[in-house]
Image: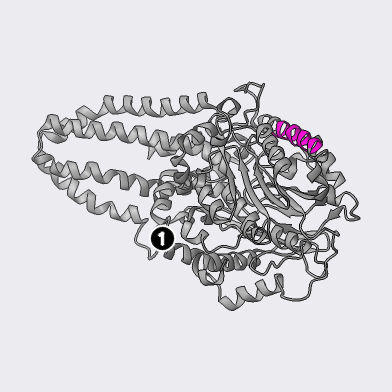
């Protein structure tokens, strides 16, 4: 209990930028409510030693001491590691450590690469002190206490049996009908304070137990009558004749989608960003069509890719890309274009196996997949893989020799943690916001060079290019999960075919799933399979934006230029997404 209490104080200090402005009374309340979950987790951890204590009557004292000491050693190491990792998980992902991190452990190199943007020395110091101090306490106090109890084994034997039975009460959180859960320690309207009250080890174990359990997810996401969800969905996606201004595209232009890792609108001046660091992209945006009220659907790359290429809106605790049986049922933008005679290529400088990306892209109908292994090792300028300059140049090379029409999807990576860029060394003392912006400046320069070269190419005059992000980012300025600023991203349409278009801005609200319907309408192709996609050029429909994070969602209804949150609509829409893509698979046919 003392261990958890001290680490919660460390949690407050480590995230002082977030919790520094809260009154002491609020932090005290978070600590007080957190004791409830701390006690439950402590009781779980007490069961093994109490079982051995009960068996102490038949175990030699020397062996008994070794068992207790070994368990204590392993427990302190494990707790220190988990609680230290939780500090940085919260810093980067905006929630406590849970089962969402487990799939990424399959890719240790990438996980280590991401960790290099963290304050390693501080974390190691916290971990070291979290191990040394408890071990010193254990060495100082364990022997006299245990020897005293061992002088007469009967009380210890009986005490162990009784305590194992009694521990069931704090484990489930008391005698109430519902056992303890995360909401049991939530006390504030502020999400950060509620998460501070949570015990990260309890959250981790609970999320592992719940992950993959369809019934628990169904309970969480299915709360309303189907008719209510259908009514909202039909209002947002009416089946009627669209009124769409056409951009006068030829029947089958080349299409290039460039997905920019973590490009938040906060760093793009032409989108009103307060931390401008993309001057080249600003020039491109001001020459093309800007979608100024555009949002990422989720907060991870795998969710963003599925939203862009399959029009699957994000659901907080699930990723469709990680489930091959579900992926096989999806509609795919590359498949539609491939059936229309397009040569389709996916280009990424990292490992295609990451987050089950390769399986998804193969199912999506890409003819060619280009990944890390397709680049020379001397071009691996990052721990993730080939940097953006090399990857963008590969697209230019392919386009020069490829038969038209072609569809290229390119996914950048240099602006991902640990924000390493060629020719510059990371300073451990440099603020993370600065590292983030520096990485985007590098990608911006690569994009600017690519754009200049592409304009001189023969294929450019028959091409439409779409720039969009895979997701937004908490950085810079550490936006919270439910803050629209974290999810607002730029989308820009440009290319040789659009240089004379009279449309320079679309203010209608939308999100990544809308790309398919918007593009296919311009290509005069059928988008009916993409049921969650709306044509953003359609002037008869009202815009909206929906995005989801680990433990919630936000739905923004558009009223003229204003975007108004609607909590009920968000839950209704999330349920419809869950039922369509995760339960009622027959409704999503490829």
Q: Is residue 23 left or right of residue 586?
A: right
Residue at 28%, 33% (x, y): give it.
Answer: 72
Query: What is the magenta segment's predominant secondary structure?
Result: helix
Quarter occupied by residue 520: bottom right
Residue at 41%, 39% (x, y): give it.
Answer: 4
Look at the image and tell me whether residue 413 can be seen: yes
Q: Which stretch appears magenta?
A: 440-453
Residue farthest bottom in this picture:
227
Q: In front here: 327 or 578? A: 327
Q: Is residue 269 magenta?
A: no
Color style of the picture: one colour
Look at the image and tell me whether residue 25 can be seen: no
Question: Residue 254: x, y in percent?
Answer: 75, 51
Residue at 65%, 54% (x, y): give it.
Answer: 308
Q: Is residue 265 left or right of residue 75?
A: right
Q: Is residue 566 depicted above or below 50 in this figure?
A: below
Question: Residue 60: x, y in percent?
Answer: 9, 33
Q: In front here: 559 or 15? A: 559
Question: Residue 109: x, y in percent?
Answer: 48, 33
Quadrant of the snapshot with the C terminus:
bottom right
Classify mark 1: helix, strand or loop: loop
Q: In front here: 126 or 24? A: 126
Quarter occupied by residue 64: top left
Quadrant of the snapshot with the N terminus:
top left
Q: Is residue 221 depicted above or below 50 in this figure?
A: below
Quarter occupied by residue 363: bottom right
Q: In front here: 432 or 79? A: 432
> How many numbered marks, from 0 up?
1
Question: Residue 303: x, y in percent?
Answer: 58, 52
Q: Which residue is mark 1?
A: 213
Residue at 47%, 66% (x, y): give it.
Answer: 218
């Amino acid at each position: 209990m003392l261990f958890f209490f001290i680490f919660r104080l460390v949690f407050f200090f480590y995230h002082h930028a977030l919790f520094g402005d809260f009154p002491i009374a609020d932090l005290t309340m978070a600590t007080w409510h957190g004791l409830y979950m701390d006690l439950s987790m402590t009781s779980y951890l007490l069961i093994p030693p109490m079982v051995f204590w009960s068996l102490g009557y038949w175990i030699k004292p020397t062996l008994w001491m070794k068992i207790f000491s070994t368990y204590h050693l392993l427990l302190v190491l494990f707790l220190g590691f988990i609680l230290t990792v939780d500090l940085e998980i919260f810093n980067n992902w905006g929630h406590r450590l849970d089962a969402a991190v487990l799939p990424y452990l399959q890719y240790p190199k990438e996980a280590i690469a991401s960790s290099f943007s963290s304050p390693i020395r501080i974390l190691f110091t916290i971990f070291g002190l979290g191990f040394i101090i408890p071990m010193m306490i254990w060495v100082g106090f364990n022997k006299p206490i245990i020897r005293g109890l061992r002088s007469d084994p009967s009380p210890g034997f009986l005490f162990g049996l009784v305590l194992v039975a009694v521990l069931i009460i704090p484990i489930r959180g008391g005698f109430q009908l519902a056992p303890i859960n995360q909401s049991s320690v939530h006390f504030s309207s502020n999400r950060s304070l509620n998460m501070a009250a949570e015990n990260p080890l309890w959250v981790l174990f609970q999320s592992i137990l719940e992950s993959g359990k369809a019934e628990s997810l169904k309970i969480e996401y299915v709360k309303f009558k189907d008719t209510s969800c259908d009514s909202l969905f039909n209002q947002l996606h009416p089946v009627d004749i669209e009124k769409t201004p056409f951009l006068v595209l030829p029947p089958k232009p080349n299409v290039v989608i460039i997905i920019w890792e973590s490009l938040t609108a906060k760093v793009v001046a032409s989108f009103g960003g307060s931390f401008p660091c993309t001057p080249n992209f600003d020039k491109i945006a001001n020459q093309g069509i800007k979608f100024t009220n555009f949002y990422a659907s989720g907060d991870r790359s795998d969710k963003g890719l599925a939203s862009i290429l399959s029009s699957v809106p994000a659901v907080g605790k699930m990723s469709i890309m990680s489930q091959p049986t579900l992926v096989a049922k999806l509609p795919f933008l590359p498949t539609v274009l491939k059936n229309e005679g397009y040569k389709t290529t996916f280009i990424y400088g990292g490992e295609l196996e990451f987050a089950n990306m390769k399986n998804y892209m193969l199912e999506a109908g890409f003819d060619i997949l280009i990944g890390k292994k397709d680049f020379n090792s001397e071009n691996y300028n990052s721990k993730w893989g080939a940097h953006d300059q090399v990857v963008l140049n590969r697209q230019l090379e392919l386009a020069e020799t490829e038969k038209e029409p072609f569809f290229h999807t390119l996914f950048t990576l240099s602006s991902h943690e640990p924000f390493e860029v060629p020719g510059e060394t990371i300073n451990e003392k440099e603020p993370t916001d600065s590292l983030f912006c520096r990485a985007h400046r590098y990608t911006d320069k690569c994009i600017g060079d690519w754009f200049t070269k592409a304009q001189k190419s023969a294929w450019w005059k028959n091409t439409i290019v779409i720039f969009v992000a895979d997701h937004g980012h908490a950085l810079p300025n550490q936006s919270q999960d439910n803050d629209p600023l974290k999810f607002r991203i730029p989308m820009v349409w440009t290319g040789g075919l659009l240089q004379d278009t009279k449309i320079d801005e679309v203010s209608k609200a939308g999100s990544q799933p809308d790309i398919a319907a918007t593009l296919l309408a311009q290509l005069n192709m059928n988008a009916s399979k993409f049921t969650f996609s709306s044509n953003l050029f359609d002037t008869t429909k009202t815009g909206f934006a929906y995005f989801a994070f680990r433990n919630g969602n936000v739905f923004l209804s558009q009223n003229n230029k204003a975007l108004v949150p609607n909590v009920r609509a968000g839950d209704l829409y999330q349920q419809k997404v869950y039922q369509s893509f995760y339960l009622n698979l027959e409704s999503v046919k490829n």
